[in-house]
Image: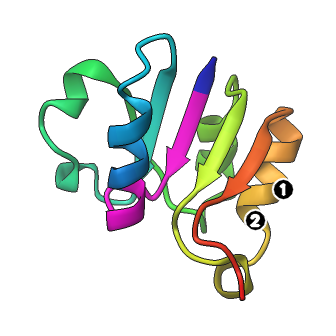
Amino acid sequence: MKIAILGASGAVGRSITEHLAAAPQLGLRLGARRIDRLPSGWHHTHDIMAVDLTDPDALAVFCAGCDVVVNSTGPTHMVGDVVLRAAATAGADYVDAAGDE
């Protein structure tokens, strides 16, 4: 199973990555605007992509081939449904880790 985590350089994304990395059968794709903010060890163990949720083409590439896309960039009421739409187009399930009120 391939899980994509958008916003992996933030506090929520890092926590999700650390928990899911404990399951070696999962393949993780990590996305962040600034991949230099990811722990250096992650570059050797995970698929890393520079991606911004405001770039639809990069977001489509990021979601492609994944079973689940986890959005930890912020709550949907703030960032809109752009990540949800990209995940749906890619045929992936979607999780909004930030949640909404």
Q: Is residue 38 above or below residue 100?
A: above
Disc number placed over residue 38 in the picture, else none: none
On the rendered image, what quadrant is the C terminus found in? bottom right
What's drawn in magenta, residue-wise?
A: 3-13
Asked whether residue 5 is drawn in magenta, I would say: yes
Residue 8 in view in this figure: no
Q: Is residue 69 above or below residue 8?
A: above
Residue at left offset 70%, top offset 36%: 68
Residues at badges 1 and 2 in contact (C-beta under 8 Å)? Answer: yes
Q: For the residue marked with disc 1, what is the amino acid?
A: Arg
Residue at left offset 66%, top offset 43%: 69
Q: CA distance from mark 1 to mark 2?
A: 5 Å
Disc number placed over residue 82 in the picture, else none: 2
Residue at which label 1 appears: 85
Q: On the picture, is 27 further left or further right than 91?
A: left
Residues 23 and 75: in front is 23
Residue 77 in view in this figure: yes
